[in-house]
Image (cartoon, grey):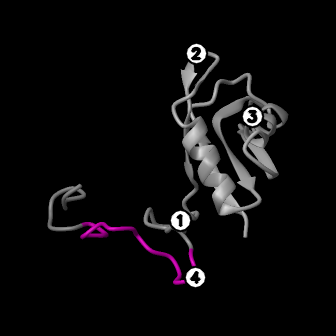
Amino acid sequence: MSSKIYVGNLPYSVTDSTLESNFSEFGAVTSAKVMMDRETGRSKGFGFVEMASAEVAQAAITGLHGMSVDGRSIVVNLARPREERSGGSGGYSAGGYTSGNRQETGYGTGGYGGGRY
């Protein structure tokens, strides 16, 4: 079973290939990806590496966490599963249109527009 590793606080100079080569000293790397900003095409400063086994992944985490890369101390740990996004700000969803968490909708309790905001 492969293990996914989160790598944070990366310098913008790090690429997929340099990330892969740094982790390959600890064992087989299945994939290495630096996250890029869609609009600017620049690195977001973090990435993910997938290792062949949990033992190899743990060795890489122990060996690389806190290491200095281009003057930045990188953060290396097991990746957490991606959280589901909720539509808490209102809008259309499977349940229909919602107005978020507001207690009052409409004109409220008197005055010009009344109610609490």
Query: Which three-letter amino acid code belongs to the residue tagged 4?
Result: Ala
User: Quarter holding the N terminus?
Assistant: bottom right
Sooner in the amino-acid sequence: mark 3 or mark 2 = 3
Residue shown at 56% from the left, 76% from the top: 93
Per the rendered image, the range of residues in magenta is: 93-107
First-in-chain label (3 vs 4) = 3
Q: In the rendered view, does 46 fall on the left or right side of 107?
A: right
- Residue wearing tag 4: 94
Residue to which mark 1 is pinned:
83
Which of discs 3 and 2 lies nearer the camera? The answer is 3
Q: Seen in the image, is 11 located left or right of residue 23?
A: left
Tell me which label, 4 or 1, sits earlier in the chain: 1
Give the crowd class for mark 4: few <14, some 14-19, many >=20 residues within 10 Å: few
Q: Residue at x 58, y 82 (%)?
A: 94
- Between residues 35 and 24, which one lies in front from this camera angle? 24
Q: CA distance from mark 3 to mark 2?
A: 16 Å
Under circle 1, the secondary element is loop
Q: Residues within 10 Å of mark 1 (few under 14, many from 20)?
A: few
Question: Residue 115 lies in what quarter of the image?
Answer: bottom left
Q: What residue sits right under mark 2 in the picture?
A: 71
Q: Is residue 81 placed above or below 69 in the rendered structure?
A: below
In the structure shown, which secondary structural element does the residue marked by tag 4 occupy? Answer: loop
For this orientation, the residue located farthest to the bottom is 95
Reading the chain from its start, which is encountered first: label 2 or label 4?
A: 2
Residue 95: say if magenta: yes
